[in-house]
């Protein structure tokens, strides 16, 4: 028993596991108090102090709280101004990274010491996400964001060594691709509801641009003479600028949408955004009988372009250049051969 009477005094036995305190070793204490209530309170104080600091001195009263918990690392990873890119608050995709890491911290416990995190904790984190039905790729991203916390903690001296774990394999891609027939159904649906949404989706299918890259397009980015569109680094996910070749159908639509617009004025109305398109895609799936198909999202249009481009060019470097993939392995998902004609005219209307 943790609390028991020994003669005229009461004894409190405290045991804190190695993975629950900063020392990385099991901590055991035997404390004495005048009565049962005092022993119970002393046991609670000692347990909390050991979890937070790794030690407890009954003569010193309540041990002061120290930094080094997961919630501290999470805050520092968000607000830090050090490093090449700074903390997540200074990065374009930082909010999503912060959310991913927060989910991990909530599961392991915000007041857990960073030093107490073990490889088994990381394995448990992976198992937890898999039990939720998340794909291996999504699990890898979430745990990678948590690894960022541990890297921050290591830099602060809160972790001696970041534990290793077995990363889930990437697995086969789960992209959903539009067939020619389904594309016609989709575009007919949008044409009947909103012609601007129809044109927006056509550009997505014809270019493979991400939703935000299309939504923020301005006339100065588009060169109708060469048939190219420039994506600046502050918009591109990879943070690298690129030039995308436009199909004839995309050129026709963008020429129409640019008419009368100032060089730095948005081509599309501001209400066409991520939240708005998510709603319209949900309505679309219900209307055409694809309700519940989780892989059928706006990003499907980008996968469709990548697949068609790969089939036409048979060159992973063309796919990488046009889609803006940071890693050539992503482009290799869409093709099986890497030698082909690099002449843009041969795949402009792929």
Image: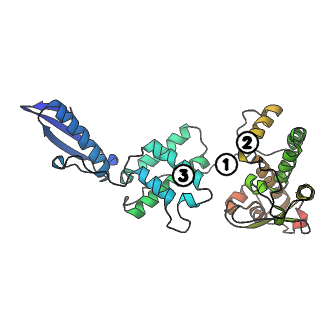
Query: In the picture shown, does residue 120 fall above or below 151?
Result: above
Residue at 55 percent across and 48 percent down: it is 99
In the image, is residue 81 above or below residue 194?
A: below
Q: Nearer the viewer, residue 28 or 10?
A: 10
Nearer-N-terminus badge (2/1): 1
Tell me: residue 39, above or below residue 155: above
Q: Are marks 1 and 3 in contact (CB under 8 Å)?
A: no
Q: CA distance from mark 1 to mark 3?
A: 27 Å
* Image quadrant where residue 186 sits: top right
Q: Which residue is mark 2?
A: 278
**Badge 1 local density, few (<14 within 10 Å), some, or many (20+)?**
few
Secondary structure of the residue carrying tag 3 is helix
Q: Is residue 335 visible?
A: no
Q: Which mark is residue 172?
A: 1
Q: CA distance from mark 2 to mark 1?
A: 25 Å
- The mark that comes first in sequence, 1 or 3, is 3
Instruction: Identify the secondary structure beneath mark 1.
Output: loop
Mark 3 vs mark 2: which is more N-terminal?
A: 3
Asked whether disc 3 touches disc 2, contact meaning CB atoms under 8 Å apart, the reply is no
Please tell me which residue is depicted at 39% across the width and 62% down the height of the picture.
156
Quadrant of residue 184 in the image?
top right
Quadrant housing the N terminus? top left
Dividing the picture into quarters, in which one does residue 230 lie?
Answer: bottom right
Residue 268: x, y in percent? Answer: 82, 52
Residue 10 image point, x, y percent? 13, 33
Q: Of discs 1 and 3, which sits in the foreground?
A: 3
The residue sitting at 20% across, 39% down in the picture is 42
Q: Look at mark 3 in the image and give the residue it sits on.
A: 98
One can see residue 43 in this view: yes
The mark closer to the camera, 2 or 1, is 2
**Quadrant housing the C terminus:** bottom right
Q: CA distance from mark 3 to mark 2?
A: 22 Å
């Amino acid at each position: 028993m943790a609390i028991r009477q020994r003669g005229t005094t009461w004894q409190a036995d405290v045991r804190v596991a190695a993975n629950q305190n900063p020392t990385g070793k099991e901590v055991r204490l035997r404390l004495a108090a005048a009565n049962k209530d005092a022993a119970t309170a002393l046991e609670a104080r000692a347990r909390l102090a050991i979890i937070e600091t790794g030690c407890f001195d009954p003569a010193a009263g309540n041990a002061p709280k120290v930094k080094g918990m997961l919630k501290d690392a999470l805050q520092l990873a968000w607000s830090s101004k050090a490093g090449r890119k700074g903390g997540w608050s200074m990065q374009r995709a930082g909010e999503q990274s912060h959310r991913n890491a927060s989910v991990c911290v909530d599961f392991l416990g915000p007041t857990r010491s960073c030093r107490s995190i073990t490889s088994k904790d990381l394995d448990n984190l992976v198992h937890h996400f898999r039990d939720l039905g998340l794909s291996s790729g999504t699990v890898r991203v979430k745990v990678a964001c948590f690894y960022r916390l541990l890297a921050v903690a290591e830099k602060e001296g809160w972790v001696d060594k970041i534990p290793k774990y077995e990363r889930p394999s990437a697995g086969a891609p789960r992209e959903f691709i539009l067939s020619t027939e389904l594309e016609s159904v989709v575009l007919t649906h949008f044409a009947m509801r909103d012609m601007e949404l129809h044109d927006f989706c056509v550009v997505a299918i014809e270019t493979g641009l991400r939703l935000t890259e299309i939504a923020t397009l301005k006339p100065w980015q588009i060169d109708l003479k060469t048939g190219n569109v420039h994506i600046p680094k502050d918009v591109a996910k990879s943070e690298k600028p690129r030039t995308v070749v436009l199909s004839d159908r995309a050129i026709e639509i963008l020429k129409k949408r640019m008419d009368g617009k100032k060089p730095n004025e948005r081509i599309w109305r501001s209400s066409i955004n991520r939240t708005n398109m998510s709603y319209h895609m949900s309505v679309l799936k219900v209307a055409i009988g694809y309700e519940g198909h989780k892989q059928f999202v706006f990003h499907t249009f980008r996968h469709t372009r990548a697949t068609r481009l790969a089939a036409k060019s048979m060159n992973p470097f063309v796919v990488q250049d046009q889609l803006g993939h940071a890693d050539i392995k992503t482009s290799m998902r869409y093709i099986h051969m890497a030698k082909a004609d690099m002449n843009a005219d041969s795949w402009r209307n792929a």
